[in-house]
Image (spheres, rainbow, N blue to C red):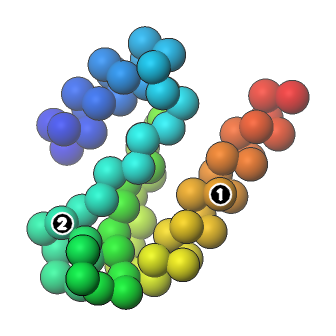
Amino acid sequence: EMLTRDWSSDVCSSDLADMIVANNLKETGAGFGTDTNIVTLIFKDSVETTELMSKVDVATLIVDRIVGRIKGKI
């Protein structure tokens, strides 16, 4: 949680990034060497943490969030 707060306030708020995807390496079944993952999506105004899901589903979620943010800004 501390890392999430630091990144969202320092990086996203300073316009260096619109979104950060943090990979959870501490949970069983997540991280490298598996077909599943748990990630935290950090935005300027919100934080979203996923449950254990396939890496394909994580990629789809990331693209969905990017497209949603773009459509919201247009």
Q: Amino acid at mark 1?
A: Val
Q: Nearer the viewer, residue 31 or 50?
A: 31
Residue 73, horizontal then vertical, whole percent: 79, 28
Residue at 17% over, 82% down: 28
Quadrant of the rendered image containing residue 71: top right
Give the residue displayed 26% in from the left and 39% down from the top: 4
Question: Dot 1: within a 10 Å radius of its alpha carbon, few (fewer than 14), some, or many (20 or more) residues?
Answer: few
Q: Please, is residue 41 above or below residue 50 in the view?
A: above
Marking on residue 25 = 2
For residue 27, which quarter of the picture? bottom left
Judge from the rendering whether residue 61 lies leftward or rightward of residue 46; answer left or right.
right
Picture quarter containing residue 2?
top left
Q: Which mark is residue 63?
A: 1
Q: Tell me the quarter of the image containing the C terminus.
A: top right
Q: CA distance from mark 2 to mark 1?
A: 21 Å
Looking at the picture, does residue 48 appear above or below residue 20?
below
The spot of residue 41 in percent (x, y) is 44, 49
